Amino acid sequence: MLSLLGAAAENSARSVSFDLIIFDCDGVLVDSELLSCRCLSDALVEHGIDADIDAILDRFLGKSIDAILTHYRGLGWKFPTHFADDLALRTREAFSKSLRPIADIETALRTVRTRYCVASSSDRSRVAHALALTGLDHLFGDRLYTAQMVPRGKPAPDLFLHAASAMGASPAHVLVVEDSVNGVTAGKAAGMTVWGFIGGSHYAGRDGKSALLSAGADLVFDRIADFPALVARNGVER
């Protein structure tokens, strides 16, 4: 049975032809959000900033480390030049120990006929590492686009527009799959169809559906296993 969440989500889904599917990585392909948020929380606490995981999820989900540091610098906090590198190493080690793919993601990717790629706020090395650890790297090849490639990260549309341009797709025929408000906002600003995914462990006990619908998601679902059928039901693959 399809796990489509809410009549409002179903009614707002637009039937369009999709030339390209852009997947976010963290929280959509790999179940990494809690791991990375714990690493960020620990690093911030070590520098005197009280930031629990819930606060980080609410404020920074879908944003790059540059955007996060810019936020705190605006509040007067200072960071050593090696902070981002240290956090990247901490996160990489956590991923190596505990990272898992989102359940059924490989089967879903092998089932859809539409071209797809990744567009992530994480840096390219972290995305490549996450995909390699979870065995998904061979399904994406070099079709990896990250916030470091554009002037502005999510919630600006730059990254999604860059990915679509690189893949030769018109924004009107692109489907974005995102787990964050910032990502949904970016996809809608790019003029794309956006589906919210709330099947990652970071949404356990949290009302992700309302947040993503409020941000403009055309549809919200919670099982990647349903994704190919949802594409067939709500769009036309080309």
Image: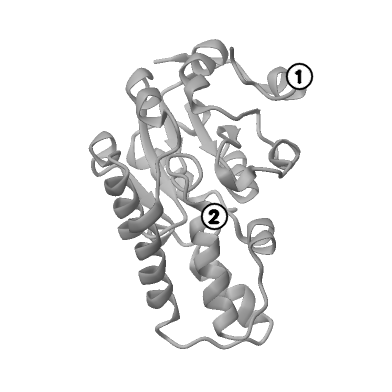
Closer to the eye: label 2 or 1? 2
Does the rendering let one see residue 184?
Answer: yes
For badge 2, the amino acid type reads Leu
Q: Residue at x 64, y 21 (%)?
A: 4
Residue 24 pos. (x, y %): 47, 43
Q: Residue at x 45, y 32 (%)?
A: 103
**Residue that badge 1 annotates:** 7
Quadrant in the picture for residue 126: bottom left
- Tell me the residue at 40%/83% (across/down): 82
Residue 186 seen: no
Q: Is 109 situated above or below 43? A: above
As drawn, 1 above or below 19:
above
In the rendered structure, the answer to whether residue 112 lies left or right of residue 67 reads left
Which quarter of the figure has residue 205?
A: top right
Answer left or right for 36 relative to 114.
right
| Residue 73 position by quadrant | bottom right
Residue 226 horizontal/vertical position (percent): 52, 20
Image coordinates of residue 195 in percent, x first then y, are 58, 31
Quarter placement of the C terminus: top left
Q: Quick one: SS at disc 2?
A: helix
Is 12 situated above or below 185? above
Quadrant of the image for the N terminus? top right
The kind of residue tagged 1 is Ala
| Disc with the residue nearer the chain's start (2 vs 1) | 1
Q: How is the image coloured?
A: one colour
The residue indicated by pointer 2 is 34
Relative image position of residue 191 (x, y in whole percent): 58, 36
Q: Is residue 158 left or right of residue 45?
A: left
> Which label belongs to residue 84?
none
